Image (spheres, helix red, strand yellow):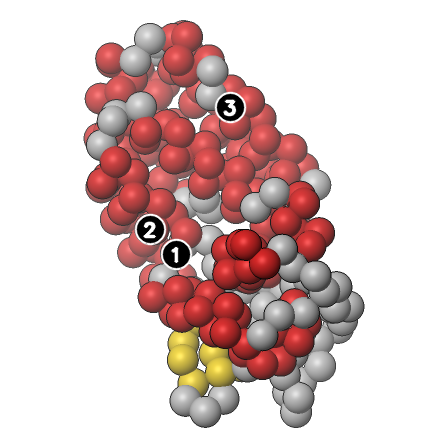
């Protein structure tokens, strides 16, 4: 989500009667009406990625709408999309509970992503010219910047953009869509602390830049090693 959209939509707070969070969210109204649902959805995704929406907590659409300065309808629609993605669960008559990805589920997601993405990247390593890989370097660098800042939400967005661009070189739009969905599902909070989280992001981002360097150099042995290690580590 763009910086402008993030500024115009505030990250949601908590419903009445729930446990207070340590970091309050001050409401900032006036969301642009032409893209309310999209802005709300992207802001909720950012809040999920960096843990501001707390796993296990229940949030109601009216309360979140009040934080956004919008009606409950676009919030409810955005939350329904997140439910489809597995990020939240519908709690009848209460709202939506934020899901928590356990180690087993994350490992399963990483395995499925590897089955889909690794063969594609290895095939592309043989066919895509170095210049096209070099053009993806800014996307890899953006993940490094976000990781260095400890910006989990920014990292989630830049990481997804990097993987999307790599796979898009294969020209299979359906594969890219499936990979995007799996990627997003693997990014919700999973209980790591801020320090460990940042270390993991930095290591993951470093693999992005190393992979681009190997692809530009057409060092296929290094590419194979990096790609397989990247998905077995699976912070991204």
Q: Residue at x 70, y 41 (%)?
A: 149
Pick the residue in front: 232 or 49.
49
Q: Position of residue 42 (x, y in %)?
A: 53, 55
Locate residue 124 relative to residue 130 in the image: left or right.
left
Residue 209's mark? 3
- Marks 1 and 2 close (CB-CB < 8 Å): yes
Pick the residue in front: 195 or 24.
24
Can residue 198 be seen in the rendering of this structure?
no
Q: Nearer the viewer, mark 1 or mark 3?
A: 1
Q: Vertical placement of 187 versus 114: above or below?
A: below
Q: Residue at x 46, y 36 (%)?
A: 161
Q: Which residue is mark 2?
A: 182
- Marks 1 and 3 close (CB-CB < 8 Å): no
Can residue 84 be seen in the rendering of this structure?
yes
SS type, badge 2: helix
SS type, badge 3: helix
SS type, badge 1: helix
N-terminal of the two: label 1 or label 3? 1
Q: Which residue is mark 1?
A: 185
Q: Tell me the crowding category of disc 3: few under 14, some 14 to 19, or many 20 or more residues within 10 angstroms, Cα based.
A: many
Locate residue 139 relative to residue 13 in the image: left or right.
left
Q: CA distance from mark 1 to mark 2?
A: 5 Å
């Amino acid at each position: 989500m763009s910086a402008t959209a993030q500024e115009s939509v505030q990250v949601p707070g908590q419903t009445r009667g729930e446990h207070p969070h340590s970091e309050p969210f001050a409401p900032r109204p006036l969301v642009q009406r032409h893209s309310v649902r999209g802005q709300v959805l992207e802001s909720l995704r950012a809040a999920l990625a960096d843990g501001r929406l707390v796993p296990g907590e229940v949030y109601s659409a009216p309360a979140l709408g009040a934080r956004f300065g919008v009606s409950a309808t676009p919030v409810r629609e955005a939350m329904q999309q997140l439910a489809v993605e597995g990020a939240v669960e519908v709690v009848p008559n209460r709202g939506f509970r934020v899901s928590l990805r356990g180690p087993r589920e994350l490992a399963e997601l990483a395995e499925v992503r590897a089955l889909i993405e690794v063969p594609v990247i290895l095939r592309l390593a043989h066919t895509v010219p170095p210049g096209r890989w070099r053009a993806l370097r800014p996307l890899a660098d953006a993940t490094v910047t976000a990781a260095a800042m400890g910006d989990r939400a920014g990292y989630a967005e830049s990481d997804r953009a990097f993987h999307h661009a790599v796979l898009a070189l294969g020209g299979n739009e359906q594969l890219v869509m499936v990979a995007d969905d799996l990627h997003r599902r693997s990014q919700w909070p999973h209980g790591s602390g801020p320090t460990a989280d940042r270390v993991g992001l930095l290591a993951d981002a470093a693999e992005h830049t190393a992979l681009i360097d190997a692809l530009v150099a057409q060092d296929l042995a290094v590419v194979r090693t990096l790609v397989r290690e990247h998905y077995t580590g699976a912070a991204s």
